[in-house]
Amino acid sequence: MVNFRTTVLALAAAVTVSADYWIDPDTIPLFTRKAWCNDQRSTCPTICRQTSVGQPLINDCDAETLTYGCLCSDDKQPNMTEYTLTLPYHVCTAWGTKCVKDCGSNNLCSAACREEHPCGAQSPTRVNETKTATTSAAEETSTPTDGIADGFGDGTQNSNSRPGSGAGALALGNAYGLAVVATGLFAGLMLL
């Protein structure tokens, strides 16, 4: 017979992992749960470094019950559901896999399992983001001419127009690539 204390402890453990997703730990192989806990213990200090200095006050994970604790040195507890490679992330993905399996051949149900229940970093809080307080209208509409170009453009303008952009080289390659290949083939045939 299950007693009240055991039931309360089991519910508390489920709430500790994630308020939205719960899986029976016994349905996941122990070696997998241990790997999840290793990820959790590795991720906690990285997340804590965003707001505090030093090692977390609490950084623990129990593979048997799938519960964890992460308390930063500034006494803040990060929302681990906003990150990947955390225990809540792994539990969420396992929940999604079980949901898809329970749907059987119903594709709409399977799609809803993943689309309506995304796991991990959807829009995490950016703690260390630096923002400029004021920006002139001319600065907002100008095309950058200095700095680092990633070569992919920003999606709002023709990326070939960005000085220093690698996209210009790609466009040149597209335009003249066939001519270079044809010339190489012709030269190769002439040598035969």
Image (cartoon, rainbow, N blue to C red):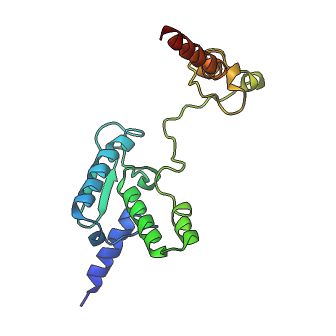
Q: Residue at x 47, y 75 (%)?
A: 104
Figure quadrant of residue 68: bottom left
Please state the horizontal and vertical placement of residue 14, each as a whole percent of the image: 36, 70
Q: Nearer the viewer, residue 160 or 149?
A: 160
Please state the horizontal and vertical placement of residue 43, each as a whole percent of the image: 34, 46
Q: Nearer the viewer, residue 189 or 91?
A: 189
Q: Is residue 42 above or below residue 30?
A: above
Name the side, left or right, on which 183 lies relative to 75: right
Q: Quadrant of the N terminus?
A: bottom left
Figure quadrant of residue 63: bottom left
Q: Residue at x 53, y 35 (%)?
A: 129
Q: Is residue 162 above or below residue 11?
A: above
Q: Decide if residue 62 is in sight here.
A: no
Q: Decide if residue 81 is in sight here.
A: yes
Figure quadrant of residue 152: top right
Q: Nearer the viewer, residue 150 or 46?
A: 150
Residue furthest front in the image: 192
Please state the horizontal and vertical placement of residue 121, each as a whole percent of the image: 48, 49
Name the side, left or right, on which 56 lies relative to 22: left
Name the side, left or right, on which 136 lies relative to 39: right
Q: Is residue 27 above or below residue 170?
A: below
